[in-house]
Image (cartoon, rainbow, N blue to C red):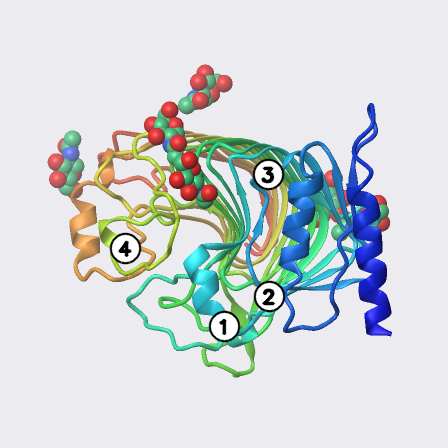
Amino acid sequence: MHWLTISFALAFGLLTAASPATGTKRAICTPFAEGWEMIDDSIAINKAIVDCGNGGTIVLPADQIYSIRSQLDFTPCKNCDFQLEGQFLISRDEWTYWNSVGSIIKVAGVNGAKIRSLTGKGFIDGNAIDYYYRERWQFIAPAGPHFLHVTNGSSNILVDNLTIKNVPMRFFRADGNSTKLTYSRLSLSVIEQWGGAPSSESETFGFEMGDVSNVVIDTVSMNFLARGPKRGGPPGGGIGVCAAFDKGTNGVTVKNILCQKSWGGVGVMVGTSSQSALYENDGRPNTPQVSNGRGVSNIHVSNLTFDGGWATGYMNMLELEPERISNITWDGVTVLGGDAAVGDRCYLRCHCQTGHYAQCAKSDWKVAFENIRFENFKGAIGSRPGAGWGCATNQTLCDIQFNGWTSNTT
Ligand SMILES: *[C@@H]1O[C@H](CO)[C@@H](O)[C@H](O)[C@H]1NC(C)=O
Ligand SMILES: *[C@@H]1O[C@H](CO)[C@@H](O)[C@H](O)[C@H]1NC(C)=O
Ligand SMILES: *[C@@H]1O[C@H](CO)[C@@H](O)[C@H](O)[C@H]1NC(C)=O
Ligand SMILES: *[C@@H]1O[C@H](CO)[C@@H](O)[C@H](O)[C@H]1NC(C)=O
Ligand SMILES: *[C@@H]1O[C@H](CO)[C@@H](O)[C@H](O)[C@H]1NC(C)=O
Ligand SMILES: *[C@@H]1O[C@H](CO)[C@@H](O)[C@H](O)[C@H]1NC(C)=O
């Protein structure tokens, strides 16, 4: 039976390979799964990306479960349409390998890729529960592969209508001056993560980006319920951050987001995503630093529903450069639980430097906050923060305003 499947796959593969694109018709490749967890289906999928990625379509049918044991590389893709209707099962016994390649899916220097499900059945099991259970050290910022890394000036990338669970570290990482990125209709979840502040609050990220422009994140539900504080403990608080914007992020629309159980919601996190002197032990490979001095600008967040640690605001680890944070608006936020907004200029993700707060407080006034708006918040938001919220006494520029707050808790 199994051999029949394989020979059918081979025959089909040959057929599609033998029918090149004619006229306006797109080439179609349909790689099939071998059907064994220990056999790597990435090889066939990568071959399909090579064969049909240049303007063609790669279809992964609904009845197939693909074992992903090596990196999926979209580099050959030019306006390709990758349709995952079946399932991916990421290998769980190869964390050293995954860390060494830096991401499970690499989209580097690609112009035009759709990674999506037409039926909505496309499903990815990151299979990382044993990774979550690994030994952790409080003073080392978490390393780990990105699930899908868009980098090296990629553009026109769409990720749509997929359900993804239990990836090792970050769902979506984008950097390297990539632009025109859309992430829509996604359902992201982790279970069995554990821990809490300070050692593992950022173990999971829905979206983490810097040095990107023109990004849309639309209709995404995230649930990062953790077991904590101990491995295997009872389901406790949440873990991770739904969406974090670091330096060099300019132009993001975030809307229709349900963010549940995470430590952080949708916020600006300067200096938290790159390797730096403060992250010597990060151990994260192939992650370009995000640049200094480009600030974070033009981010509009609307229709966010949050239940977790903190819903909005900023967590900044000051590095050497004073950054400008401008034109950030959260408009239409419903808080079911947690802090409505946080403003911490001296947050240090790895908690690895004793005395950081004292050091930071000497220069945190150099950050400029221009046109920061928290508007139309409702739910469990407490009282509206007063003037001066989030600013040092002599902040260079501190234009932060709260308008239209309707609390049901005061
Ligand atoms: C990005 O491009 C550079 C230069 O072409 C290359 O060395 C590097 O490996 C690329 N990065 C990735 C993640 O592909
Ligand atoms: C994916 O698309 C299908 C068909 O359009 C839709 O029914 C389904 O709800 C979508 N799934 C998600 C997660 O948006
Ligand atoms: C991104 O663009 C900036 C400004 O043009 C440049 O300084 C930086 O080196 C670029 N980064 C990458 C990774 O290409
Ligand atoms: C707000 O987002 C939720 C998804 O979290 C969606 O169901 C709802 O329709 C959106 N509301 C509006 C007014 O768009
Ligand atoms: C902030 O918005 C204003 C008004 O739209 C615009 O003039 C300014 O260039 C924006 N700032 C940045 C850094 O893009
Ligand atoms: C702002 O206050 C800090 C101490 O809180 C001080 O070190 C710094 O020089 C002050 N900056 C200005 C411009 O006064």
Residue 332 got which mark?
Answer: none
Q: Which residue is mark 3?
A: 76
Residue 156 horizontal/vertical position (percent): 61, 31
Q: Which amino acid does the dot numbered 4 rest on?
A: Tyr
Residue 12 horizontal/vertical position (percent): 84, 52
Q: Which residue is mark 4?
A: 279
Mark nearer the N terminus (1 vs 2): 1
Residue 71 horizontal/vertical position (percent): 55, 55
Q: Which residue is mark 2?
A: 166
Looking at this view, is 355 or 116 the one in front?
116
Helix, strand or loop at disc 4? Answer: helix
Mark nearer the N terminus (3 vs 4): 3
Alpha carbon separation for disc pair 3 and 4:
33 Å
> Label 2 near label 1: C-beta < 8 Å?
yes
Q: Quadrant of the C terminus?
A: bottom right
Helix, strand or loop at disc 3? Answer: loop
Alpha carbon separation for disc pair 1 and 2:
9 Å
Q: Which amino acid does the dot numbered 2 rest on?
A: Asn
